[in-house]
Image (cartoon, rainbow, N blue to C red):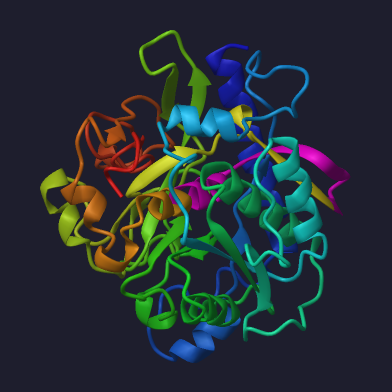
């Protein structure tokens, strides 16, 4: 498949997701511009999950395993010490609504790839509602897909980590934020948020400031443009790439994914670590780092809560893939208690990040906010993990 055809598939998938967003959030555009009435704004402003149905990169996978990249692929592409790190770390996944088959589906994913079991009985897996209880919200098939994707990506990157799933009552920022607060209260080391909506000031949804816990957020799946909570100054904003095998020393190559969100927040202050990088943004610039997100080079996911005619083994992309990957890389590094989200900027080098220098996600000015280049750029940030040294 040529690069042009892959780009067409990717763009079409992003457009289809954008058309489907109202099914997840009927009030996404409200209250995006005001910092007044924070509680009311958070309660009436909604987020949507950031996954995109996709397909596997051509010729990349043997017939005996599911289509889409699996744990060995991701660990190889990002040079991760997944077999030796992660003990004692907890990665929290925050999503809305209930996935009734989450634990059973997680068991199939992990057993298929030969990963150690992660169950409630063993203490490895824990599922709670946004108050920490076990009375779960209603099932939503789309969000259930998001949950399965997120759990599988943590398993792929940090199989020795514990996993905490916190299910918000609805997709309002008030409820998702309460779930983030609960994840922090339950002592997660890192928290992944694979959802987004219109740019917001931190004062409208003040849930993401938890010193000593690294919080990641997907940058978006509709190309150039900023989404919250990725635009929060308190999170690591995670962009997206297209990942393919290559005959180079690394064995892989990446370009910026055309659907990855990026840009400049209208409200939130810049990270101090971004100052030397010429973002062209007077405020918070998105993204900080990135990982695979292109649905044309998608990852394998197992989910038996039917959604859109899909069930069982599936392939997905979107920055929903990238956020839990990066949260899990932070867990592998094990530094969350003593760092903040400026850390990747102060530890940026060729030995810590694979710089992504080609591809774009739209038209913009200045160009670095939507076109990949040497060094920092909007769609991919500093690049993708080269081990855990940048985390």
Which image quadrant for residue 339? bottom left
**Residue 61 in picture, x, y percent from top left:** 67, 19
Q: Is residue 345 above or below residue 296?
A: below
**Residue 256 in picture, x, y percent from top left:** 42, 32
Res 219 visible: no
Residue pictured at 78% horizontal, 45% vertical:
108
Q: Is residue 29 above or below residue 256?
A: below
Q: Quadrant of the N terminus?
A: top right
Residue 311 within the magenta-colored segment of the rendering:
yes
Q: Residue furthest top?
A: 247
Q: Is residue 35 above or below residue 386?
A: below
Residue pictured at 22% horizontal, 61% vertical:
271
Span shown in magenta: 305-326
Residue pictured at 52% horizontal, 90% vertical:
40
Q: Nearer the viewer, residue 91 or 308?
A: 91
Residue 339 within the magenta-colored segment of the rendering:
no
Residue pictured at 27% horizontal, 60% vertical:
284
Residue 82 left/right relative to 308: left
**Residue 80 in picture, x, y percent from top left:** 42, 36
Residue 74 left/right relative to 270: right
Res 128 visible: yes
């Amino acid at each position: 498949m040529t690069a042009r055809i892959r780009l067409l598939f990717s763009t079409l998938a992003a457009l289809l997701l954008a058309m489907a967003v109202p099914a997840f959030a009927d009030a996404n555009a409200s209250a995006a511009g005001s910092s007044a009435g924070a509680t009311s704004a958070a309660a009436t402003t909604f987020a949507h999950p950031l996954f995109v149905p996709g397909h596997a990169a051509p010729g990349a996978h043997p017939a005996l395993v599911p289509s889409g990249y699996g744990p060995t692929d991701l660990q190889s592409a990002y040079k991760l010490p997944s077999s030796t790190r992660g003990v004692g770390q907890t990665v929290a996944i925050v999503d809305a609504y209930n996935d009734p088959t989450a634990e059973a589906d997680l068991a199939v994913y992990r057993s298929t790839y030969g990963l150690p079991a992660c169950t409630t009985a063993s203490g490895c897996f824990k599922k709670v509602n946004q108050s920490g209880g076990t009375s779960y919200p209603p099932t939503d098939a789309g969000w259930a897909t998001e949950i399965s994707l997120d759990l599988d990506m943590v398993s792929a990157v940090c199989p020795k980590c514990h996993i905490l799933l916190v299910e918000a009552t609805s997709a309002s920022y008030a409820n998702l934020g309460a779930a983030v607060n609960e994840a922090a209260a339950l002592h997660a080391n890192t928290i992944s948020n694979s959802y987004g909506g219109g740019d917001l000031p931190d004062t409208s949804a003040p849930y993401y400031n938890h010193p000593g816990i690294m919080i990641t957020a997907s940058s978006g799946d509709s190309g150039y443009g900023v989404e919250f909570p990725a635009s929060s100054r308190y999170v690591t904003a995670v962009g997206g790439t297209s990942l393919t095998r290559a005959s180079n020393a690394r064995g892989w190559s990446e370009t910026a994914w055309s659907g990855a969100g990026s840009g400049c927040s209208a409200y939130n202050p810049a990270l101090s670590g971004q100052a030397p990088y010429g973002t062209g943004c007077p405020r918070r610039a998105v993204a900080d780092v990135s990982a695979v997100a292109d649905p044309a080079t998608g990852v394998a996911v197992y989910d038996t809560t039917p959604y859109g005619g899909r069930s069982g083994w599936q392939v997905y992309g979107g920055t929903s893939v990238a956020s839990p990957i990066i949260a899990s890389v932070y867990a592998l590094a094990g530094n969350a208690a003593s760092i903040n989200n400026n850390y990747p900027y102060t530890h940026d080098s060729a030995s810590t990040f694979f710089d992504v220098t080609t591809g774009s996600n739209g038209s913009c000015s200045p160009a670095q906010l939507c076109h990949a280049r040497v060094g920092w750029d909007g769609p991919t940030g500093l690049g993708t993990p080269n081990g855990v040294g940048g985390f």
